[in-house]
């Protein structure tokens, strides 16, 4: 059975050691690094199943590490940060993180979040008998197997969450999804305090699609969003 490997990137050795201790008690194998450049190298040279990244790290911060990871990898990423504002959390999620935990934190809560993200990742990546077809609408070609979006011959670079939102909406044209429904489907957990998360993702998704007139994603005020391609 393949061992699950978790990357811990934090320049505070005490925190990294504490996280590793709790995760190893759960049976996970951990790799610890103390700066962003080393985190990128670890992802390139090891088979990483989940990454825990401090945002404020030497050489490369957690945001830049995430951008580089997301160019080739889709493993879950959990941010750790002393920044507690909703804007900081939303920024991390939009960049490509899957979860965000503020310092100081309960190590057991972090372990629970790691377990939840791994369960969701394994579920989404398991072979499926369901035929997920390529969607074509309004000049978009949305390929769920390759996780690619091509718009009139131009490749549109989306984060995993942006792609999942677009694919969900495009699979059900004209159906209106509430922000709560989108969050529960895409993030795989209950709608919580970051109520603006879906709105910010929709905004960045529209920007990348050049959808300034809401050609693809229409807002139904007071209800939610619908695909109008």
Image (tube, rainbow, N blue to C red):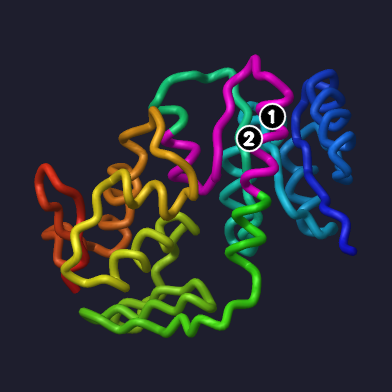
- x and y, in percent, of residue 24 in the image: 88, 37
Q: In this view, does 192 lie to the left or right of 58?
A: left
Percent position of residue 88, x then y:
45, 28
Is residue 92 rendered magenta in the image? yes
Q: What stretch is highlighted in magenta?
A: 90-117
The circle drawn on residue 79 is none
Q: Is the magenta stretch mostly helix, strand or loop?
A: helix
SS at mark 1 in the image: loop
Between residues 124 and 61, which one lies in front from this camera angle? 124
Which residue is tagged 2?
A: 61
Which element is circle 2 on? loop
Q: Is residue 5 left or right of residue 79?
A: right
The image quadrant that residue 61 belongs to is top right
Q: Would residue 67 be found to the left or right of residue 40 on screen?
A: left
- Asked if residue 95 is positioned above or below residue 157 in the image, the reply reads above
Location of residue 23 in the rendering, given as x and y in whole percent from the top left corner: 82, 35
């Amino acid at each position: 059975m393949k061992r699950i490997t978790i990357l811990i990137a934090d320049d505070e050795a005490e925190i990294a050691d504490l996280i590793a201790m709790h995760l190893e008690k759960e049976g996970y194998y951990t790799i610890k690094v103390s700066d962003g450049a080393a985190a990128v190298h670890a992802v390139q040279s090891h088979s990483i199943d989940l990454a825990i990244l401090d945002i404020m790290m030497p050489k490369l911060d957690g945001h830049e590490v995430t951008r580089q990871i997301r160019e080739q990898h889709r493993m879950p990423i959990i941010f750790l940060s002393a920044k507690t504002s909703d804007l900081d959390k939303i920024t991390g999620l939009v960049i490509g993180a899957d979860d965000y935990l503020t310092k100081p934190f309960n190590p057991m809560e972090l372990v629970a979040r790691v377990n939840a993200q791994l369960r969701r990742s394994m579920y989404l990546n398991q072979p499926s008998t369901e035929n997920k077809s390529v969607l074509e609408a309004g000049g978009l070609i949305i390929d769920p197997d390759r996780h690619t979006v091509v718009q009139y011959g131009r490749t549109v670079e989306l984060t995993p969450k942006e792609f999942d939102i677009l694919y969900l909406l495009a699979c059900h044209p004209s159906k209106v999804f509430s922000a709560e429904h989108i969050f529960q489907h895409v993030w795989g957990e209950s709608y919580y305090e970051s109520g603006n998360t879906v709105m910010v993702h929709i905004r960045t998704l529209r920007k990348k699609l050049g959808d300034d007139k809401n050609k693809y994603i229409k807002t139904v005020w007071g209800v939610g969003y619908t695909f109008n391609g």
